[in-house]
Image (spheres, rainbow, N blue to C red):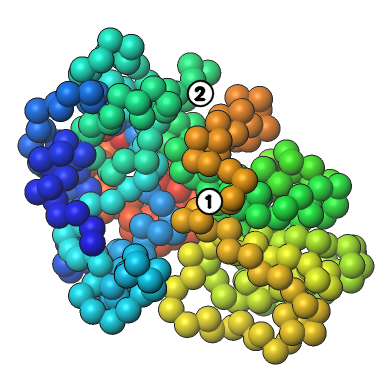
Amino acid sequence: MAPPIDELVAEGRIGGRTVRIVDTGDVECGTYPVAPLRDGHVRVRTVRSAISPGTEMTFYGKSATNVYLHKTWDESLRLFVAGTPSATYPLTFGYRAAGEVVESGVDDVPVGSRVFGSWRHTEYTALEADAARRQALPADLSWDDGVDVAQMGPICVNAVAYAEGEHEGGVAVVFGAGPVGLLTAQIARATGAATVHVVDRIRSRLAIAERLGFRTVEAAPDVDVAVTLKREHGSEGIAVAFECTGSARALHEGIRTVRRRGTVVAVGFYQGQAEGLFLGDEFHHNGIAVRCGQIGNVHPAWTWDRLRARTIELATSGQLVLGGLPRTTLPVERVAEGFAALGRPDEVLQVVLSYD
């Protein structure tokens, strides 16, 4: 079960201005007390947090689709079962943040230290000192870079790890030019893909991919993406596709795009029934492997610390653009505008909240 808000306040995990979703599905900014700092912890004032355009949006609105709102997660069985939902409103949430230490109970993490993390959209949070040490934000990375070091970058490093190197020296296709797709495409290129195509239906997002140096395919109604790519590269030319939209139709198109016995890494967060996924077609006839690359299952060869270190390495070397991707920045008090803006994906790529 998600911890109640009173418990989060008492533990210092939220405090001050904090984003929450209430039982109407609306998102708002409330204010909570700041608890005394516990021994062995540091208090961080958030400078920036970014809204996840995938997971967090599934908790939003009157018809929120996130499975935790509708079923019980049985950890012992690792199954969703009928029962009391594992998450109830009001909810606090978030996993993309960066901030500055403003109070410290340890000598080696002084006030003024810059850290990144996966804490909620909240003005103040408390971190264990060991976590703060491991999550120091390098001086040559900006606050906007920092919001994607803890989890968004690792999501995409993990996704590419599930390709098992099959993209190296060849062609990879990324479905989705949102933040996850754009980062995944960059990491696929940095880890050896000779050519990376990015597919999306939104021209403004494809323009961002082109500025990053990728070849693009517009998924227009009259375009057969798989046919277009296979006519260029041949039926056996594409070993790996990464599906980063959460659309079952895009997952099906990824299955159609890769070669016989090719691999599709499913990175998106799929909601409800899989409309548009036809498993009797190319999946059946070409023997396609679909691997779940979700960050909830870190690749066995990796750890969270290694995923984060790799994200930092790629960002500081210039191989991975994080904070340089377009974003709309709003004061945290205007969070409702930010969620509404994400419903206009042709205009807005991502939304960042400021706590100045």
249 w.r.t. 180: above or below: below
Element at label 1:
loop
Left or right: residue 250 versus residue 93 is right
List x then y, in percent, for residue 35: 9, 33
Q: Amino acid at mark 1?
A: Val
> Which-is-in-front pick, marks 1 and 2?
1
List x then y, in percent, for residue 187: 67, 43
List x then y, in percent, for residue 258: 78, 68
Quarter where residue 32 is shown: top left
Element at label 2:
loop
Q: Are marks 1 and 2 in contact (CB under 8 Å)?
A: no
Quote the CA–CA distance across marks 1 and 2: 25 Å
User: Nearest the camera: 95 or 202?
Assistant: 95
Residue located 65% across and 49% down the image: 161
Q: Which residue is under mark 1?
A: 298
List x then y, in percent, for residue 15: 15, 37
> How crowded is the residue under tag 1: few (<14 C-alpha within 10 Å), some, or many (20+)?
some
Sequence-wise, the earlier of marks 1 and 2 is 2
Q: Amino acid at mark 2?
A: Leu
Residue located 89% across and 67% down the image: 236
Q: Which residue is under mark 2?
A: 141
